[in-house]
Amino acid sequence: MLRISEEVAAALDAGHPVVALESTLISHGLPYPQNLAVARALEDEVREAGAVPATVGVVGGVPTVGLAPHELERFATSGAVRKLSRRDIAVAAAQRADGATTVAATMALAAAAGVQIFATGGIGGVHRGAERSWDVSADLTELARTPVLVVCAGAKAILDLSATLEYLETLGVPVVGLGTAELPAFYSRSSGLPLTASAESPEEAARIWHAQRRLVAIAAPGGMLLCVPPPEAVALPRAVVEAAIERALARAEAAAVRGPAVTPFLLAAMAEETAGESIGTNVALLRQNAHVAALVARALSQLAP
Ligand code: PSU
Ligand code: MN
């Protein structure tokens, strides 16, 4: 049902820290060759910070936690890798397809394997214009029900961040800022949207997560977001990002893009509209989040189960 790599299984058995990583950003979120370099760099970041990386995907129909190096390469280079949310996993399994897992699907597989900490870039959320399109990412509903802490730079800036935060509140998902009391805006450090909770350190974030799991019957039963602003040196000014988003959204509208194709289309359009700058920022924040997630996983492994 679920293939767990030998290295990841051994780490889990020994109670060593493990960090899950997703594969949609590799296959559908970033262009080649940056995507392969990033896939490897994120695993290196996790290792250097003292945890074991577990990149998640569906390989030839087999849900897998801990992709092998040659599988990472295939996911970065093959045009035939599907984008899988939770609803798509059984279809891919039956058809023995390769599939890159979104935040939602990665959470599901990570939880099934016993991995509690997961690093990504920006989660999916409520799209702009969702009052007409009903385009709301399954990442949000997954956070409501699956017990995984997701380290991210907030939700992707192409979304309606205010509506996304409201929806997370409705679903009862805690959103905690790391060293900030504001929701980061993915490419930018600030969104102007206040958070109700913040942690001063990865250790404090681990204690909050530990409390949520201990209080599972009376506190949030599912996941938690730990939001880390992108590094100062590569963060983009909000005005620049907003102007690029307007142009990217107009192109998506003109091309009548719908469904799971929307996010990959907008991310690629953002790269063009910012002359590649958005990719540099995306890569830097991903590396930072992998590092932070490893520190949280280490702190968690020190706390009594
Ligand atoms: N973050 C990134 N790049 C990405 C994604 C997130 O920096 O490509 C992916 C994640 O896998 C997320 C997905 O779950 O986009 C959201 O897609 P959708 O809006 O279709 O749910
Ligand atoms: Mn969608």
Image: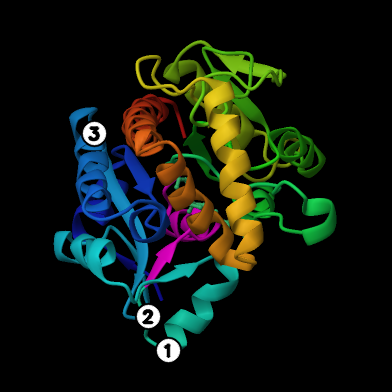
Q: What stretch is highlighted in magenta?
A: 99-116
| Circle 2: residue type | Gly
Q: Residues within 10 Å of mark 3 (few under 14, many from 20)?
A: many
Q: Residues within 10 Å of mark 2 (few under 14, many from 20)?
A: some
CB under 8 Å between callouts 3 and 1? no
Which one is earlier in the sequence, the residue at label 1 or at label 2? Answer: 2
In the rendering, which numbered label is found on residue 61?
2
Q: Report how far apart the C-alphas of labels 3 and 1 lie in the structure.
A: 34 Å
296, above or below 258, in the image? above
Q: Quadrant of the N terminus?
A: bottom left
| Circle 1: residue type | Gln
SS label for mark 3: helix
SS label for mark 2: loop
The colour scheme used here is rainbow
Residue 124 in sight here? no
Residue topped by disc 1? 95
